[in-house]
Image: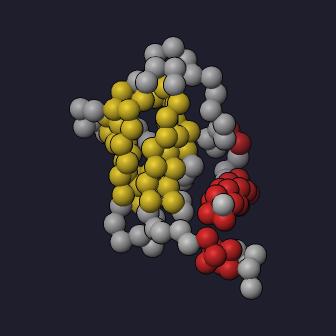
């Protein structure tokens, strides 16, 4: 239960921090998935604690263009198919990849753990715990 609360608080704080530092609204990614068009899928890319998308490849290994906003959480609308997303974090020893199979008209999540997240340590660093 504590872990669920900690992760929820972390997501809320991360999103609030990133939206205050973000560029003008015209260049920011949507925060909620829009209705998915026929023939496309919604892929949510999550990195723990956060990550920057450095590579997005389709099933054939072809590099896809990256969005202007590359920090997780990301919501991407892509054609249905298999994708590999690679994320990096400045304190992580190496980039981490996650794979996802996106189906027409559906949303799916690609998760990558870049650094272990200890809830109590997170609360201490955020100033919520003494």
Q: Residue at x 45, y 73 (%)?
A: 91
- Quadrant containing the C terminus is bottom right
The extreme left residue here reads: 60
Colour setting: secondary structure
Residue 66, horizontal then vertical, whole percent: 44, 42
Camera-side residue: 101 or 20? 101
The answer, for residue 14, to whether it is visible in the render is no
> Where is residue 120, by image quadrant?
bottom right
What residue is drawn where x is 53% and y is 68%? Answer: 117
- Res 56 → quadrant: top left
User: Relative to 92, does residue 62 appear above or below in the rendering?
Assistant: above
In the rendering, at what x and y percent does residue 95 appear?
35, 61
Please provide percent x and percent y for residue 53. Answer: 45, 51
Answer left or right for 60 relative to 93: left
Residue 101 x %, y %: 38, 32
How many numbered circles are shown? 0
Please identify the residue farthest to the top as the structure is shown. Answer: 38
Find residue 102 and report its image quarter: top left
Q: Residue furthest front?
A: 1
Residue at image point 50% right, 55% down: 47
- Residue 116 seen anywhere in this rendered image of the structure: yes
Image: 20 above or below 42: below
Q: Is residue 130 left or right of residue 45?
A: right
Q: Which of the pair 4/68 is nearer the observer? A: 4
Image side of residue 129 versus residue 39, left or right: right
Say which residue appears at 64% left-offset and 28% top-offset.
Answer: 34
Task: Specify the quadrant that holds the N terminus.
Answer: bottom right
């Amino acid at each position: 239960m504590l872990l669920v609360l900690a992760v929820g608080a972390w997501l809320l704080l991360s999103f609030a921090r990133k939206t205050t530092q973000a560029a003008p609204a015209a260049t920011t990614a949507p925060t909620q998935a829009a209705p998915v068009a026929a023939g496309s899928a919604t892929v949510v890319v999550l990195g723990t604690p956060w990550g920057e998308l450095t590579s997005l490849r389709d099933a054939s290994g072809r590099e896809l263009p990256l969005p202007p906003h590359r920090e997780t959480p990301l919501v991407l609308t892509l054609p249905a198919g298999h994708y590999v997303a690679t994320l990096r974090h400045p304190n992580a020893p190496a980039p981490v990849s996650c794979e996802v199979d996106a189906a027409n008209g559906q949303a799916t999540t690609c998760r990558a753990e870049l650094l272990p997240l200890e809830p109590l340590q997170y609360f201490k660093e955020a100033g919520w715990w003494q």
